[in-house]
Image (cartoon, grey):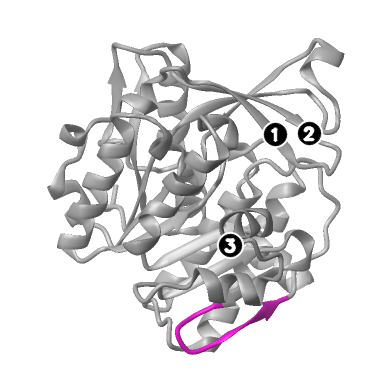
Amino acid sequence: MPNPLVICLGEALVDITPPTRGTSITSTGQMVMAAGGAPANVAVALARLGTASGFLGRVGDDFFGRYLVGVLDQNGVDTSALGFSQQANTGLAFVTWDERGDATYLFYRNPSADTLLAPTDIDPAYLGQAQVLQFGSLLLATEPSASATYHAIKLATETGLLLSYDINLRLTGWPSEAAARTGVSGPLELVQIVKLNRHELEFLTGESDPAAGTQKLWRENFRLIAVTLDSEGCFYRTATASGAVSGSKVQPVDTIGAGDAFMAGLLDELRRNEFAFEDEEVIRRACYRAGAVGALTVTRPGGIPAMPTRAEVEEFLARA
């Protein structure tokens, strides 16, 4: 297996969903299990798109944990930095849908194995072989996983990796909205790539307009902000340019993992163009292709099971 070019740090969880979108576990009495967790979703999507990826985190030494490791291995994700915890079980995320059709989550993670990732679990040599460290905000809500995340950020920065941050706000994981806003904002002073959705942008900036919100959010260390706008596409901002890219119209079956698929598509295309942030055409193409990866994902059920291959994305774009 090649050395991972993108290392995804964070949670690998098991998603428990109703059998069909728009229903609930309590109304149907039925549950379906799928491998998930945003960083794990991104790692698999990257591997399927042709970018070597690795996963850095912890799962429980239980059948859910072994199931997750198996799924990652089967999809070509490097799991040499994925450890088993004896102290806590694998985290579960029970999923239902709100009136907007967006997935809402009930986490069983108090604690779960992913929250027990410690700074001593971060191997500088493992990070040193990559180009990008990709992470989200969920591990920032708990200790020692928050300290582990910041330690990994420090090591990655010293090694010269790009830091890519998917806000992936889950308010139920935090004690309050104020704590979430403070905790989620912490890494913004350190990273180069930020991806978030329109609701997260408004949560952090008070601005619903992507142009105004990204301008308010911008930091000197940023190279790219991408704001996903569901079926409308996305808005991007770099140090020298900003604009909107239209989305691909599809009939959604399940929106779980759509943002993670977009994140993977964005990183995959940026890598193939040597992270040329100053080239607006590269940024626009990366955003457009990322949108196509996300669009394909929502046409299938599940998070990881729905992630498309590069060949499927090429076919989809050819039809579009």
Query: Label 1 is placed on what type of residue?
Result: Thr
Mark positioned earlier in the residue sequence (1 or 2): 2
Q: Could you tell me if the residues under marks 3 and 2 are in contact, i.e. CB atoms within 8 Å?
A: no
State which region is magenta.
237-245
Image point (56%, 50%), residue name? 260
Closer to the chain start, of discs 3 and 2, is 2
- According to the picture, the residue beneath numbered tag 2 turns out to be 97
Above or below: residue 2 compared with residue 283 = above
| Of pointers 1 and 3, the one earlier in the residue sequence | 1
In three-dimensional space, the C-alpha distance between marks 1 and 3, rounded to whole angstroms, equals: 22 Å
Q: Nearer the viewer, mark 3 or mark 2?
A: 3
Q: Is residue 301 visible?
A: no
Which one is nearer the viewer's eye here, 267 or 66? Answer: 267
Real-space Cα separation, disc 3 to disc 2, in angstroms: 25 Å
Residue carrying label 1: 104
How far separated are the C-alphas under marks 1 and 2? 6 Å
